[in-house]
Amino acid sequence: MKFIKKSALVATLVAAANANAQSTDPGVGTNPKAQGATEDVTPNTGPNGSEDWLNTGITSDGWNPPYMALDDLYHISLDDFYNGIGSSCSQYDQYFQSAASKYSVDPVILAVIAMQESSCNADAGGPTPGLMQVSCDNYPNGECTDSIQDNVDAGTKYLKSQIDSTGGNAIEAFGSYNGWFTANSGLNDNKGLTEDYPCSSEGQSNGVPQNLDYLHQVLNGWLMGLDVYGDDNWIGTYKCDQSCSDGSKC
């Protein structure tokens, strides 16, 4: 048997772990307002903070989102997004620009939401159709239309309403966009969204279970120009099967 000195063994294990780890540096730096932030995006952290920080409370008494304003978020430029993973979104730029101007939201944020929600497919169906995948209540007169601009305006209006209602907290607003709810909001024995809730009987009765990697995927994935649905699907640690068929809590 070949023996390796302890120091050499540790170095070997560290090297192996680093070789197997997937990370990338999007070149935007580290957000000083985000806890656990790193320049590299890894399965559990990135420039806009660690997943544990973004998901504060999920593993205990319910989601208690930390605060970060929309203008505080680090992200790549709109041109870089369009020239990279968001190429399918560029055809809708006029709609993003119009809504961005109307609601004072950076257009790259809107393009990213469209990418995450529908892969920038204006023909995406379902009960919340189109690019932005929001309910018809947010459309003019509270009724869905075939207008792409109405759809983008509806999604932007909803996002802005959530930002305003949370005192400017973009993290809570993004979570709300995906159906997350905070502690003391009534659901889940008033605990709010927790790690075990999505696949509990109550969680499943409230529709498609929430993806607990959502915030990390959006803030440290899509906003960094990474393809969370493709080559960069390693981003996130919960890996919840949203059908709840794999036996996991989420």
Image: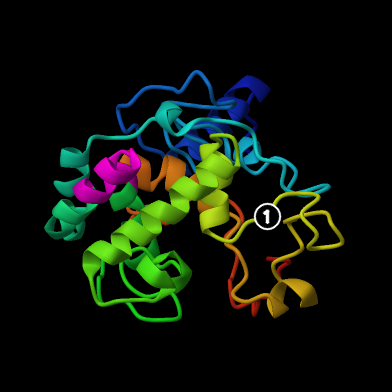
Which residue is most to the right?
A: 189
Quadrant that contains the C terminus = bottom right
Point out residue 209 in the picture as x, y percentages from the top left corner.
62, 70
- Looking at the image, residue 96 lies above or below residue 78: below
| 147 lies left or right of 75 | left
Residue at position x 42%, y 57% from top?
Answer: 233
Q: Is residue 211 magenta?
A: no
Secondary structure category for the residue under label 1: loop
Say which residue label 1 marks: 181
Check the image and tell me how it is coloured: rainbow
Q: Which image quadrant is residue 149 in?
A: bottom left
Residue at position x 45%, y 42% from top?
Answer: 219
Q: Which image quadrant is residue 116 in?
A: bottom left
Q: Which residues are magenta?
A: 97-109
Residue in the foreground of this view, choosing between 45 and 65 = 65
- Looking at the image, residue 208 lies above or below residue 61: below
